[in-house]
Image (spheres, rainbow, N blue to C red):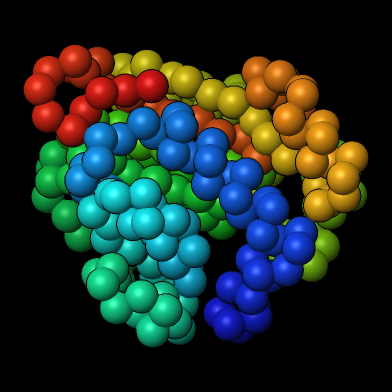
């Protein structure tokens, strides 16, 4: 899909609501201090990079797609864009405070390798936004349209990946977008249903390093 067409979806009624819902979960679970450095891995057109920057974080966008990075640069020239592979990040150990990967790991062949790479480069932790296999969206859309070729994950997958990380992370999760539409009912349900139910289309997971609580940008969820 062309980057401009993909990014334009976030300006539709449905895309705007879903994007705002996912961004809110990302910011809440990541809980990064203002000014914290964030590497947005698999940033694509930069939608979530821009949301992070608007929330006061210092963001670098990383993606393996030249066209997506070119579009992201045109949308916001204040956000550095770096060509890079999630499974082999061109950054030094503990060189950034946080990593985010929002609906990008679903297109990575070895997600556990990508997680290990992000864990290597962060000082504080990371946020994962995943397509949830136990959701209504999976039932309706799997293998079709923009979801063609995407992998759908669940908490069991995340815990399996996280078990390989050193040091062992503290895991915090929630889910959202229980009804994948922007109807008044979908919006109402999003407000009243507990986020601890594992059936939202967007599975939001934060992995925090254990040495939190010290002075600086790391404060955890």
Observer-nearest of 132 and 19: 19
Asked which quadrant contains residue 90, the reply is bottom left
Asked which quadrant contains residue 130, the reply is top right
At x 59%, y 73%, the residue is: 7
Q: In which quarter of the image is the N terminus?
A: bottom right
Q: Where residue 147 sits in the image (x, y, percent)?
A: 73, 60
Instruction: Specify whether 131 is left or right of 181.
Output: left
At x 21%, y 18%, the residue is: 212
At x 70%, y 61%, the residue is: 15
Q: Is residue 191 visible?
A: yes
Observer-nearest of 157 and 210: 210
Q: Where residue 167 sits in the image (x, y, percent)?
A: 24, 20
Task: Give the vertical position of 45 relative to 174 (above or below).
Answer: below
Task: Give the vertical position of 75 relative to 103 (above or below).
Answer: below
Instruction: Specify whether 183 is left or right of 116.
Output: right
Instruction: Specify whether 215 is left or right of 30.
Output: left
Number of on-image labels = 0
At x 87%, y 50%, the residue is: 183
Q: Where residue 180 sits in the image (x, y, percent)?
A: 81, 47
Q: Quadrant of the C terminus?
A: top left
Q: Can residue 134 be seen in this view?
A: no
Instruction: Specify whether 64 is left or right of 14.
Output: left
Q: Where residue 66 sits in the image (x, y, percent)?
A: 40, 81
């Amino acid at each position: 899909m062309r980057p401009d067409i993909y990014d334009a979806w976030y300006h539709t009624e449905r895309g705007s609501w879903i994007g705002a819902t996912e961004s809110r979960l990302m910011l809440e679970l990541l809980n990064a201090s203002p000014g914290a450095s964030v590497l947005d891995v698999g940033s694509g057109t930069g939608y979530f990079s821009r949301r992070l920057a608007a929330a006061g974080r210092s963001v670098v966008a990383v993606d393996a797609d030249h066209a997506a990075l070119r579009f992201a640069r045109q949308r916001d020239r204040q956000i550095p864009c770096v060509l890079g592979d999630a499974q082999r990040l061109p950054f030094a150990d503990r060189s950034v405070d946080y990593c985010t990967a929002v609906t990008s790991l679903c297109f990575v062949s070895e997600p556990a390798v990508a997680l290990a790479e992000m864990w290597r480069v962060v000082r504080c932790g990371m946020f994962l936004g995943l397509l949830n296999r136990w959701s209504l969206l999976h039932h309706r859309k799997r293998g079709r349209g923009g979801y063609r070729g995407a992998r759908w994950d669940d908490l069991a997958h995340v815990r399996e990946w996280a078990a390989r990380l050193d040091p062992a992370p503290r895991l915090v999760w929630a889910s959202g977008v229980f009804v994948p539409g922007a109807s008044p009912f979908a919006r109402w349900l999003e407000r009243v249903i507990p986020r601890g139910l594992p059936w939202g289309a967007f599975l939001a997971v934060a992995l925090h390093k254990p040495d939190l609580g010290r002075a600086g940008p790391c404060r955890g969820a």
